[in-house]
Image (cartoon, rainbow, N blue to C red):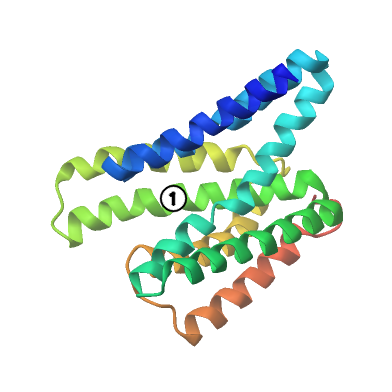
Amino acid sequence: MTYLILKAILSAIIIVAVSEVARRSPGIAALISALPLIAVLSMIWLWRDTGDADRMAQYAQATFWYVLPSLPMFLLIPVLLKRDIAFWPALGAGCLLTVLLYVAMVALLGRIGVKAVKQLLLYGLAALAEIGGCFAFWAWLRLDRSPLWLIPGMVSLAIFAWVLALSEAEAAGRTYAAYGGIYILSSLVWLWAVEGMRPDRWDVTGASICLFGAMIIFYGPGRT
């Protein structure tokens, strides 16, 4: 019983610390919240209770997959708040989105397997790195930003090439072809989220066609 009480107290201390720090510095509070403190403590408790390496590995891997559906909530809520939507409805919308994404993730993992989901995530990360790197050059040449923007831009492009090379596809050309659909979709998300321009119906239609073609390449027999 003492052990359970200790775990509950430590978890509560983290929550209280985040809420208090947020009053003075939301950025630092967000950093604390983003740190996987609860997950690390849970792994420590689990290891102390069981000492089972296989169970620990399964827990850590499952945590990775189930963290992903919770991330879009932290993008949706600020967007809604900036559009003068009250906090509670915005929070409710964020929670609803998270629930739907959790259901989708469970269904996706069960239907196509971890390997295929991993490949899609690699494409998503590669797209983010490529778009970010290219935008650094765009900002320098078109938006009169400092040449120093080129440094993180080149690093981002190097990360893009490295991540895309992690693909398990047998041929580079096929990897790039399948990745193209994800890149186009991610570019429109960037257009809306970063540049503040809402994609029109032609953008959405074109991206949908490209994404459909990429999925045909991606899901061809023996590909995933």
Residue 26's place in the image compared with 102, above or below, is above
Quarter assignment of residue 25? top left
Residue at the bottom extreme, as displayed:
201
The mark total stands at: 1
Specify whether residue 154 is in view.
no
Q: Position of residue 218 (x, y in %)?
A: 73, 58
Q: Position of residue 161 (x, y in %)?
A: 50, 41
Asked if residue 34 lies left or right of residue 106, the reply is: left
Q: Position of residue 220 (x, y in %)?
A: 81, 60
Q: Residue at x 82, y 16 (%)?
A: 50
Asked if residue 214 lies left or right of residue 73, the reply is: right
Q: What's under tag 1, amino acid-wise?
A: Glu
Residue 64's place in the image compared with 203, above or below, is above
Front residue of this view, candidates 145 and 102: 102
Quarter of the image that includes the N terminus = top right
Q: Residue at x 66, y 52 (%)?
A: 120
Specify whether residue 184 is in view.
yes
Element type at mark 1:
helix
Q: Which residue is mark 1?
A: 130
Asked if residue 92 lies left or right of residue 100, the reply is: left
Q: Residue at x 72, y 44 (%)?
A: 169
Mark 1, other Cα within 10 Å: few <14 / some 14–19 / many ≥20: many
